[in-house]
Amino acid sequence: MTPERKKVYDRLKRIEGQIRGLQRLIEKDAPCIDILTQVAAVTSAMKKTGSAVLSNYMKTCIEESGGNAKRLHADLHAALSRVIDFS
């Protein structure tokens, strides 16, 4: 596993812990504001993780394009479209 993938993996493990904490809040009938605060934190963490994945992908995409501008454009467009759909 590359160092970049390890960082993403570690982020996802932290998010997994946040999700478990969110489940506990719901089980304990925590106030809605507390639940929504945690939902916002998880959402933010997922967006940051997506950004890290996109950054790594862009680096790889540029390296693998071999100077082929059309391929680079198509690959980056596809990746950005997916990220925008997540938002």
Image (cartoon, helix red, strand yellow):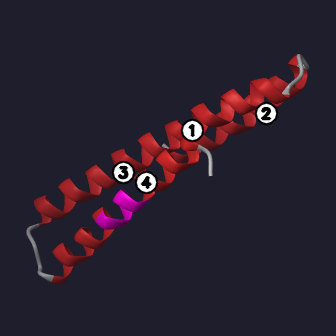
Q: Residue under circle 2? A: 75
- At label 4, counting other C-alpha atoms closer than 10 Å, the crowd grade (few under 14, some 14-19, many 20 or more) is few
SS at badge 3: helix
The label on residue 10 is 4
Residue under pointer 3 = 43
Q: Amino acid at mark 4?
A: Asp
The amino acid beneath tag 2 is Asp
| Number of other residues with Cα within 10 Å of mark 1, as a class: few under 14, some 14 to 19, many 20 or more | few
80 with respect to 44 (left or right)? right
Separation of disc 4 and disc 2 at Cα? Answer: 26 Å
- CA–CA distance in space, label 3 to label 1: 14 Å
Tag 1: residue type?
Ile
Q: Earlier in the sequence, mark 2 or mark 3?
A: 3
Location of residue 2 (image quadrant): top right
Q: Which residues are magenta?
A: 13-17
- Of labels 4 and 1, earlier in sequence is 4
CB under 8 Å between callouts 4 and 2?
A: no
In this picture, residue 36 sits left or right of residue 67: left
Tell me the residue at 73%/32% (across/down). 60
Q: Name the disc covering residue 19, or none.
A: none
**Residue matched to label 1:** 84
Labelled pair 2, 1 in contact (Cβ < 8 Å): no
Question: Marks 2 and 1, Cα distance to the nearest angstrom?
Answer: 14 Å
Residue nearer the viewer, 6 or 87: 6
